[in-house]
Amino acid sequence: MGYVIAIAGKGGTGKTTIAALILKVIKDKKLGSLLAVDADPNSNLGEALGQEAKETVGSIINEVAAHPDQIPAGMSKDRFIEYRLQTAIREGDGFDLLTMGRPEGPGCYCYVNNVLRNIVAKLIKEYDYVVIDNEAGLEHFSRRTTGCADTLVVISDYTKVGLRSAKRIKELVDELGVKVKNKLLIINRSSVFIDRQAVKNTGLNYIGEIPEDKSINKINQNGGSLLSLTDKATSLKMLRKIGDVIWQKN
Ligand SMILES: Nc1ncnc2c1ncn2[C@@H]1O[C@H](COP(=O)(O)OP(=O)(O)OP(=O)(O)O)[C@@H](O)[C@H]1O
Ligand SMILES: [Mg+2]
């Protein structure tokens, strides 16, 4: 059974960046087979990993809807979509990637979410680690796309507003009864001043801060994969130092 690491947080806090860094560390440490799930319809985890997904859950659903004749006789539409997804999971360098993507037209999000939730539930059994990069906000919890996780990593900036939003995530997870063993907090792009009381008030287990990293900015400017960061990168160095609690199975 795969160990599920879900990343959450408010918009722009660095969820995708830290998801990519976590994937890099697990891959470099050779901890086991690895599935990256980009569960953000405005997806860019693939881009951060230098692995543009050709097919996504959204695109496959669109295509099957447009050409239902390709479904083999005796196979249900859902089963066929699942089969197509299994083959579409891109084999990256040391990990596979499943991307949600966008459905076409209004009113399709529910279906895409259902398909994603079901396929992830099945795929969890086939990998040692599953790292899920979620969209900003709280909706993926109420929609149950994040139905359970071994480790939830909430990413926040150092501001009071940011930390309050991290606290709301913790409260919602508890309210909804989402099964999570470790509820962790990382402060990203930290500043000199961090309000320790506000950190404590989140109710999350604070594991440390990731600094603003010039080498990430450089990759941003020039394009490229976060997997190409070297061990000198300050963000990666810090994640290796504080991150064992994220990926260590207990
Ligand atoms: N530690 C860091 N040092 C430098 N730049 C960073 C760092 N963390 C994130 N960034 C940059 O901040 C921006 C937002 O990061 P990212 O896309 O990871 O956030 P996000 O939470 O996934 O955003 P969204 O809510 O839109 O999905 C990106 O340009 C990213 O490269
Ligand atoms: Mg993101």
Image (tube, rainbow, N blue to C red):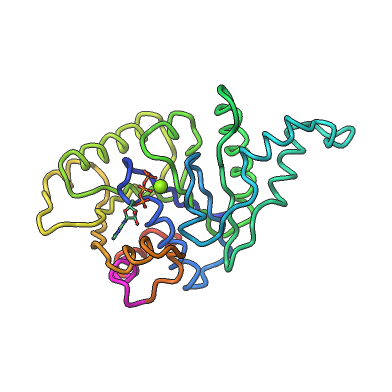
Q: Hey, which quadrant is residue 24 in on the image?
A: bottom left
Q: 120 or 133, which lies in front?
A: 133
Q: Which residues are magenta?
A: 231-240
Q: Hey, which quadrant is residue 67 in on the image?
A: top right
Q: Which residue lies most toward the front here?
A: 222
Q: Residue at x 28, y 70 (%)?
A: 234
Q: Which residue lies most toward the right here?
A: 73
Which quadrant: the C terminus? bottom left
Q: 109 or 144, which lies in front?
A: 109
Picture coordinates of residue 132, whole percent (x, y): 48, 49
Q: Residue at x 21, y 37 (%)?
A: 164
| Residue 155, placed above or below residue 67 | below
Picture coordinates of residue 199, whole percent (x, y): 18, 47
Q: 131 or 215, which lies in front?
A: 215
Does 243 sit left or right of 126 as displayed? left
Q: Residue at x 59, y 33 (%)?
A: 103
Q: Residue at x 46, y 68 (%)?
A: 227
Picture coordinates of residue 238, whole percent (x, y): 28, 68
